Image: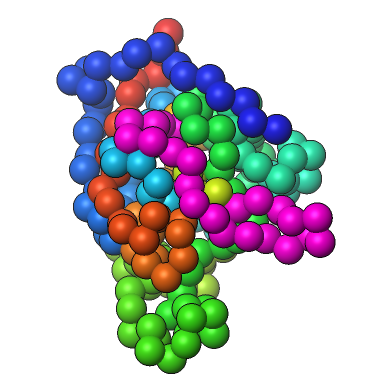
Amino acid sequence: MTRISASPARDAALALHDYFVPANAPFSCLVRKGQSVRIVDLEGQQAVDTLLYRADDVSERYSSQDTLRVQGSAYVSTGTRLISCEGNVMATVIADTCGRHDTSAGACSCEANTVRFGHQVKYLHACRENFVVELSKHGMSKRDIVPNINFFMNVPVEPSGDLAIVDGISGPGDHVELRAEMDVLLVISNCPQINNPCNGFNPTPVQVLVFAAED
């Protein structure tokens, strides 16, 4: 169910950290327990593939399966608890101006692109490669990539049970905000996909703001 809820207006100048993530790029940062992280879709219709790892033990990481099971919902939105593979709450979605975020379709890869769109796209950049690059900075490898959240990605479930990737519904400035319930490593691939409409066929930059824990 869509649950659109914007948190109070935030002044980016008051953020502890203000990151600009270019189109197609990987990114990661540490978010401490109680802090909140806001991901802003600057130009609209930009899928932001996201993973979470426990900062002091990266073997505990986001579980899409447990998150879906606990919520009883196919989508992520305000109030969703993001659950780890150990059954712990890693973060809670506290605001969402878009209302549609996927955690079933996973990340694009060169192999999947080839199967879906033909051998001519084999060497195009993909999210899985972004994750490999970023995770290597934290002592991890492709073995540590798990099914991810796709913030702002519109993936309706068809009556047949199939997943469809269609035009995103996020507009310029839409955001989703998470409150960390433990120290987490946030890892992003700002999706470079140009062969389906998840990015409006035009990958664009996003902003990541980290705010202090509220008293």
Overall secondary structure of the magenta stretch? loop
Where the C terminus falls, by quadrant? top left
Residue drawn at 29 percent across, 38 percent down: 42
Which x, y percent locates residue 2? 64, 31
The reply to whether residue 123 is visible in this rendering is yes
Quadrant of res 14: top left
Q: Is residue 93 magenta?
A: no
Q: Which residues are magenta?
A: 155-176
Instruction: Answer above or below: position of 183 versus 105.
Output: above
Q: Nearer the viewer, residue 152 or 169?
A: 169
Residue drawn at 54 percent across, 80 percent down: 116
Q: Nearer the viewer, residue 215 or 197?
A: 197
Where the N terminus falls, by quadrant? top right
Which x, y percent locates residue 25? 27, 59
Give left or right: position of 147 versus 56. right
Q: Is residue 171 magenta?
A: yes
Residue drawn at 41 percent across, 27 percent down: 36
Which x, y percent locates residue 170? 44, 38
The reply to whether residue 179 is visible in this rendering is no
Residue drawn at 23 percent across, 23 percent down: 12
Furthest-bottom residue in this view: 119
Give left or right: position of 203 versus 83. left
Instruction: Answer above or below: position of 159 versus 214.
Output: below
**Count of all numbered marks drawn on residues in the image:** 0
Which x, y percent locates residue 115? 54, 85
Instruction: Answer above or below: position of 167 versus 15.
Output: below
Quadrant of res 166: bottom right
